[in-house]
Each structure stands twice: as C-alpha cells, then as structure tokens.
Image (cartoon, rainbow, N blue to C red):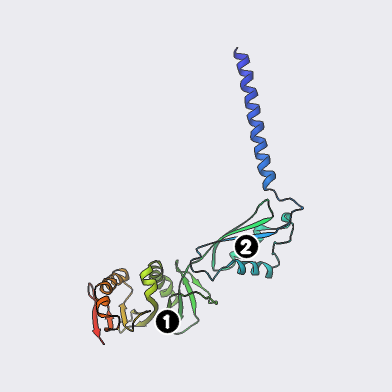
C-alpha cells in the first residue's frame, strides 16, 4: 500500500510540475514579441502631472522622433526599450522612467516628472525653475500658472529655502490660490526677507525671513478669516508677519 501511495504521489508531482512548466511557457510565449508584429501604439503614463506642461505624451514622442528611435511602425523585436529609457532619463524634468513592450504591439512608457514649485527670476542671472526636492531645473517654456520668485536670490537660497516655501504653498489650496509672487530682498542685517504678493487686493505682505513661515502663514490665514472678510481686502495697505504671534497692519 505504501508503494502504491508513493507512486500516486510521484505521478501527482510530475503532473503538477508539467502544469507549472506549461503555465510558465505560456506566459513567456504571450509576452515575447512576435518578430512579425509591429508597434502600433505608444502608451504614456505620466505621474506627478498636476502641473501638466513640462512633460506631455506629445513631447515624449517628439523626443523619440528627433533621436531616431520612434517605435511606431517598427518590428517589436527591434525596439530597444533601454535606449528609450536612457534618452528620456537625460531630460532633467523627468525623475524616473520605465519602458517595456506588450504582446499586442504596444510600447508602454511609465514615467514620473519632477514637480516644479516655483519659477525663479533672480536680480542677477538667468531664470530657472526649482522643484519640490530643491533641484534647479533649466528655463523652458511652461504654460501653466506657477508661483514666481523675484529679487536677490541665489541658487542655494532657492534650492534650500524657497523650495520648501513653494512646496508648502503649492500643497495648500488656499495659499495656492492667494499667493502669486515672492519678492526677495536683503535687509540691513544681510538676511533674505520675503514679501508676498497676493492675487486679490493690493497689500504688501511682509513675511520677513523664511524662518517659521508655516506659523506666520497660519496667523495670516486666521487674520483673513476673522478680519478681511468683514472689512474688505483693500482696508489695509501693509501687513507685517515678522514679529512672533503678531499681525501688524497699516490702513490705507
């Protein structure tokens, strides 16, 4: 009986291995590009595209055409996905990219673009973008609305300081709709101080140094909710947030 049971187990194991091998073979066969199949479509999935404009499906296709590696119309087995990845990785506005082929004549490109939080126009020097990780990105045409910073701004200050403030404003619906510009100047003590330019009203909002900007903006938001709504946006000419736990206003 034990010998018979052992034979049954051996047969079952062989059948299981045979089924597993067939499944693996079927998967490989299904995903392996047919030499006669040509690429008919490029499927681009662009993450972090809330500020659409830097990277688009059309711009990706244009880059592939200019580099002579545009896949549509080419046999699937001749398409080099690694070459496509390397080309797109050379674009500083792209953080990561993965390219792969499917069995139905499609080339898929999954990429994540860098998130610009501010367009910097320094007093001395060329303009550039800074992303949410503090990376400095080259100047290029960008149609979407984005926070602008002007004045005495070094790349180090933009990268290490303003990028944090820009990320905070971008992530907050209220401030993202309220603040359109940051004007940076150097005070008598050699510190960088910031003036906020609102979308509504003509106030000069003095943030002061960037230290504790979250608390300063929270005080200003509370002030808006409790005072501005009742007296109007143009009641005050200057709003100063430099001093701890205070909002100092000067009337028109």
Q: Which residue is outermost to the right? A: 36
Residue 13 location, quadrant: top right
Circle 1 — which element? strand
Where does the image place residue 56, in percent across and percent down from the top left? 57, 68
Instruction: Bin the neighbour count of mark 1 within 10 Å (Cα to Cα): few under 14, some 14-19, many 20 and up.
Output: some
Q: Is residue 225 left or right of residue 184?
A: left
Residue wearing tag 1: 150
Where does the image place residue 190, in percent across and percent down from the top left? 33, 81
Q: In this view, does 212 lie above or below 9?
A: below
Tell us which disc is closer to us: 1 or 2: 1
Q: How far apart are marks 1 and 2 (CA)?
A: 35 Å
Residue 30 location, quadrant: top right
Residue 46 location, quadrant: bottom right
Instruction: Bin the neighbour count of mark 2 within 10 Å (Cα to Cα): few under 14, some 14-19, many 20 and up.
Output: few
Residue wearing tag 2: 86
- What's the residue at 65%, 43% (across, down)? 27
Q: In this view, does 12 lie above or below 140?
A: above
Q: Which residue is outermost to the front? A: 230
- Callout 1–callout 2 Cβ contact below 8 Å: no
- What's the residue at 27%, 76% (across, down)? 229
Where does the image place residue 146, in percent across and percent down from the top left? 45, 74
Asked if residue 1 shows in the view, the reply is yes
Circle 2 — which element? helix
């Amino acid at each position: 009986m034990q010998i018979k049971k052992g034979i049954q187990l051996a047969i079952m194991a062989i059948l299981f291995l045979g089924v597993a091998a067939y499944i693996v073979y079927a998967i490989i066969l299904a995903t392996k590009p047919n030499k006669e199949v040509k690429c008919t479509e490029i499927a681009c999935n662009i993450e972090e595209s809330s500020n659409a404009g830097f990277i688009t499906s059309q711009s990706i296709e244009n880059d592939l055409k200019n580099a002579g590696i545009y896949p549509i119309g080419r046999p699937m087995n001749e398409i080099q996905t690694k070459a496509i990845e390397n080309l797109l990785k050379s674009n500083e506005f792209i953080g990561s990219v993965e390219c792969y082929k499917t069995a139905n004549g499609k080339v898929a490109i999954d990429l994540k673009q860098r998130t610009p939080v501010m367009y910097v126009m320094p007093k001395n020097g060329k303009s550039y973008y800074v992303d949410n990780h503090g990376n400095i990105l080259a100047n290029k045409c960008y149609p979407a609305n984005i926070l602008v910073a002007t004045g005495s701004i070094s790349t180090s200050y933009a990268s290490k300081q303003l990028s944090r403030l820009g990320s905070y404003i971008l992530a907050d619906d209220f401030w993202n709709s309220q603040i359109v510009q940051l004007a940076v100047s150097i005070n008598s003590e050699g510190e960088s101080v910031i003036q906020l330019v609102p979308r509504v009203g003509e106030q000069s909002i003095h943030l002061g140094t960037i230290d504790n900007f979250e608390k300063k903006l929270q005080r200003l938001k509370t002030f808006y909710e409790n005072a501005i709504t009742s007296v109007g946006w143009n009641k005050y000419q200057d709003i100063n947030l430099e001093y701890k736990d205070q909002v100092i206003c000067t009337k028109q």
